[in-house]
Amino acid sequence: MQAKVFLKIHYITKQLLKSKSVSDSELNVNLLKSLFEVIGYPLLNLVNTVLRTGNMLSELKVSTIVPVPKVKDPSKPSEYRPINLLPIIDKIIEIVVSKQLTEYFEENSLLYDGQSGFRKKHSCESAVQLVLSVFGDLQRAFETNFKDSEMRNTF
């Protein structure tokens, strides 16, 4: 089991991009990728400890909030949106937890079939199809023909 999780962490690390969503802390993405053979198992132990205890190291709870413009030439604070930059280790733990939860829910059929958000092979289109099928059922339910006398007696 530990080897399987190690391989997942290694895969996650290789997939990480030097993006704006990860803070430039002491350990950046490129350094982590190049040192993974050395720090991979200590990283695995850290991830396992966090998952087992449910406690995140306080150093990993610190983030940097950066304002990113929504429009070309922002002049008001409302024209910015905040982006939260996380430490790279926190980002890896977040991805591991997300993948394990998703895997667990999918394998045990715990998600509603109509759940489309944040699921592979599901999209807005599948959500729209569900909504349209529900409205179609409602429309058919109200297409019953009533005679005027029946309507008067009902109300």
Image: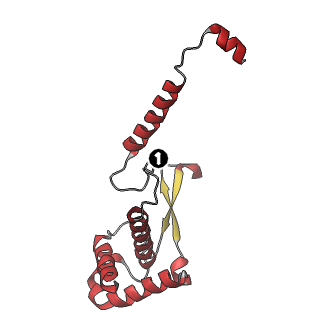
The answer to whether residue 148 is above or below residue 92 is above
Query: In which quadrant of the rendered image does the C terminus lie?
Result: top right
Residue beneath the point at 70% across and 12% down: 152
Q: Position of residue 45 (x, y in %)?
A: 41, 88
Visual colour scheme: secondary structure
Disc 1 residue type (three-letter): Val
Total tally of numbered discs in the picture: 1
Quarter of the figure with the N terminus: bottom left
Residue 8 in the image: x percent, y percent? Answer: 31, 76
Residue ID at (51%, 49%): 74
- Kindly identify which residue carries mark 1: 71
Q: Quadrant of residue 15?
A: bottom left
Which residue appears farthest toward the top when viewing the image? 148
Does residue 31 appear anywhere in the picture?
no
Residue 87 percent across, percent down from the top left: 45, 76
Q: Is residue 142 above or below residue 44?
A: above
Between residue 84 and residue 11, name the one nearer to us: 11
Badge 1 crowding class, 10 Å Cα cut-off, few under 14, some 14 to 19, many 20 or more, is: few
Judged from the image, the secondary structure of the residue bearing numbered disc 1 is loop
Residue positioned 41% across, 71% down in the render: 100
Q: Is residue 62 left or right of residue 38?
A: right
Please tell me whether residue 135 is drawn above or below residue 49 in the rendered image.
Answer: above
Q: Nearer the viewer, residue 2 or 142?
A: 142
Q: Position of residue 138 (x, y in %)?
A: 52, 29
